[in-house]
Amino acid sequence: MRQREIKRDKRVQNHDNCLPMLKSNPTTSNREQPAPGFIKRLRARINRGDSWLTYDLANLVPGGKIDEELLEELETRLLTADVGVEATEEIMGGLRKRLKRNELKDASAVVDALRTAMLEILAPCEAALQIGTEHRPWTILFVGVNGAGKTTTLGKLAARLKSDGFSTMLAAGDTFRAAAVEQLRIWGERNQVPVVSQGTGADPAAVIFDAMDSAKARNIDVLLADTAGRLQSQTGLMDELRKIVRVIRKSDASAPHEVLLVLDAGIGQNALSQARQFNEAVGVTGLVLTKLDGTAKGGVVLNIARAMKLPIRFIGIGEKAEDLDIFRATDFVDALLGAGSDPS
Amino acid sequence: MFDQLTERLSSAVGALRGKGRISEDNIKDALRQVRMALLEADVALPVVKAFIEQVREKAVGEEVLRSLTPGQALIKIVHAELVALMGGGDSELNLRSQPPVVIMLAGLQGAGKTTSAAKLARFLIERDKKKVLLASADVYRPAAILQLQRLAEQVGAGFMASEASEDPRLIAARALEEGRRSLADVVILDTAGRLHVDEEMMGEIKLLHQTVSPTETLFVVDSMAGQDAVNAARAFSEALPLTGVILTKTDGDARGGAALSVRHISGAPIKFLGVGEKTDALERFHADRVASRILGMGDVLTLVEEVERNVDRDQAEKLARKVQKGKGLDLTDLREQLQQMINMGGLAALMDKLPMGGKLPQGVSQQAGDQQLARQIAIINSMTPQERKLPAVINGSRKRRIAVGSGVQIQDVNRLLKQYKQMQKMMKNKKLFRQLSSMGKGGFRGRP
Ligand SMILES: Nc1nc2c(ncn2[C@@H]2O[C@H](COP(=O)(O)OP(=O)(O)OP(=O)(O)O)[C@@H](O)[C@H]2O)c(=O)[nH]1
Ligand SMILES: Nc1nc2c(ncn2[C@@H]2O[C@H](COP(=O)(O)OP(=O)(O)OP(=O)(O)O)[C@@H](O)[C@H]2O)c(=O)[nH]1
Ligand SMILES: [Mg+2]
Ligand SMILES: [Mg+2]
């Protein structure tokens, strides 16, 4: 169980678990060796000790026999992890075929096959966020539905970029929600990075445009722009987002350089519609999956990965500045399956 | 939000239609469809299983086998079970205890607690003329207390200041005291979002509950929530004696299966729906209406309520009667609707409430902006009464005249007529709708 030694807003920032994204190496590689204990930590966070798919697997198949009951149990586990009916059926269909061809001899072979099938879907999505130096400021726009974790993720990423040596600025593009500006300001203070804001009710596109100006004047490396939460079905608000992007392009035709869609792991199949429609509106370039520190498995990313192959840049595993990790397909799937090399 | 679920259930049941009798086999098929639909709608698997079992038990019973129309019988069973699962009756807030009555909100991060606290305050101030005090025990999320303070100002509720450096329990105790001192009728306590697996934070919320002994302890849950909703609902209902649920963000297109899951697992009735970000975007929850909507009968009652709030009663009743009868609307009705819609959040909001809810034809929702509505009204105004009643007579030259008269392009007139036709089609051609609306007039009860 996660310990809460210090209250969340007073915690000392601690980056020893973050993978380096050094300024000298802006194209952060995802292939580096994980920090020691990374898999264990991730697994602990995601599975809280009871490894998801393999839990009780031995009991399920006394003598290692593979039968319909086992397959049904695996299917149940995929479904309850929000993998979705369609993706689950596809994965299970593959397993059943291999079973028919007698390729799977025992329970562990089944788990391996499942792991491989999941990896096949997720591996193409493993691509770290890259900070380019050819454009300044490198502008990253945060979008997503209400309460997904945009502002918090932005705060966490600011901490990370700063510790990696990038000069960073925040733009308070949520001018709608009560105290959204102040929430972002507090993240600015925590990270000691400047925040550009206007009052509540201001034009969000103008706020971000001004921030880009100000960042240019100060030769800032990265600008992180927050936006108000909006449901993807709200056409008016989606149009507002399009306008924000149009106005950003007036300041820099190559911007935004990254559009991060923040998804709450607790959301079910609607996340797929979120990915589709935000992508349609503003061209999403990466996903962040938040709140993986709960029991929600975030399996819907398999569904999104199947459909859209969008890179998954980060996962959120808590509310503190350091609770942000790079998404790694192998670690993610290994952690989910409890089959990592790192014994728990 | 229940649109797709409606569709799947309709098609599942549709497959049964026309077959003289339900066999074990074809009910299996239909139930499989129902299972898939519920899963796709994010109803949690254990809840789906329990639901299907109940329906199966009843469906293979004599009642169905003797029934002349198995499809109708199955709809009836699915409907009844949905109503039963989601609560049966309506659920009012309990405000009858000694004032100040305390309402405490709890839930996962980002669910909508703070916003819902302000919505509830506004609801109680405006509907019940209550004096409401808002207080925040969220010392964790940056600017959480300020967020509630701003909202309190917006809705005209009292606000008890608190600091992020304070102990949440002391804040709660102070809120109760301040409520008594200021003679508030209701104290609403907002709490920090917390994960149900965070033992320390779950311990905290138990202490907060002990401190203020709320009359209403409401679990706030996102209608977009997935399978994990059951785990959260279970943990929160084990930690706290929940008295109700607020289902938020139902203005989106999520299928809303969490409503079923949370109700089933927590046992607490769903009392309100959050239907937008603004502080007036709160609606009462009616299980039978939502179940009807799931089955494609449309949320006619909610529509009536909504229309009443914005337009005069006569028109509302006339409209509702027409909708209920499945009668086509003429262009005069469309004009009345358009006028009213300007206050009601646009065409999409209205269509969503109609039978086969939300099946808005492609491209129509984009036209729902107030400006377009006004333009469409102008077009209808330029028509003769006969043209409004019988749009079929509108030929090319008439179109030109109407366009000139209302200062629009001919394409705009065409678009309006096309949109009108699509609405007509939707309401006339839905076999299911007709059948269901006739059932509503005693068709169910009339059968053995
Ligand atoms: N446990 C946990 N909580 C998180 C995580 N990320 C964000 N949160 C919490 O989720 C809640 C909402 O986060 P915000 O960052 O305000 O979300 P947002 O998307 O900016 O919300 P809006 O601007 O209102 O749409 C806050 O209480 C955050 O502390 C995470 O990875 N884990
Ligand atoms: N569209 C829509 N948005 C909503 C609704 N209810 C809340 N929101 C939005 O959801 C986001 C989160 O709402 P909050 O009230 O801050 O959520 P919370 O549960 O207090 O969040 P934490 O305190 O961080 O746990 C905000 O952007 C709200 O405006 C709703 O019914 N519809
Ligand atoms: Mg935000
Ligand atoms: Mg809150």
Image (cartoon, rainbow, N blue to C red):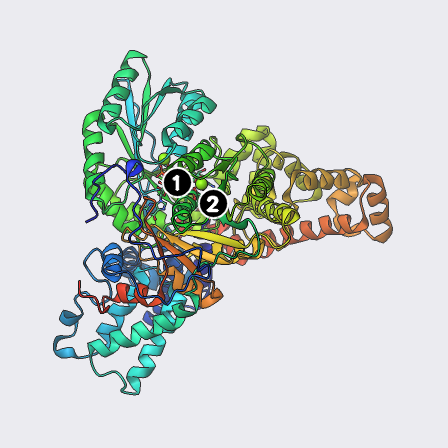
x and y percent of residue B194 in the render? 28, 41
Query: At 24% from the left edge and 79% from the top edge, which residue is drawn?
Result: A109
Q: Which residue is mark 1?
A: A191
In the image, is residue B163 above or below residue B85? Answer: above
Q: Amino acid at mark 2?
A: Thr
Q: Is residue B289 left or right of residue A338?
A: right
Give whichever of A333, B20 is nearer the camera.
Answer: A333
- Whether label 1 lies within 8 Å of ligand 1 gets the answer no
Ligand 2 quarter of the rendering: top left
Are labels 2 and 1 assigned to the same chain? yes
> Please, what secondary structure does the residue beneath circle 1 have?
helix
Query: At 15% from the left edge and 71% from the top edge, which residue is drawn?
Result: A58
Q: Which residue is mark 2?
A: A168
x and y percent of residue B393 in the render? 80, 50
Q: Which mark is residue B103?
A: none
In the image, is residue A79 above or below residue A101? Answer: above
Query: At 42% from the left edge and 21% from the top edge, which residue is drawn?
Result: B125
Query: At 84% from the left edge and 40% from the top edge, which residue is drawn?
Result: B405
Counting residues from the start of the chain, the first of labels 2 and 1 encountered is 2
x and y percent of residue A228 in the render? 50, 41
Number of residues whose C-alpha sits closer than 10 Å to that of mark 1, classed few (under 14), some (14–19) or many (20 or more) = many
Count the marks: how many? 2
Spatial distance from mark 2 to mark 1, Cα to Cα?
10 Å
x and y percent of residue B356 in the render? 52, 52
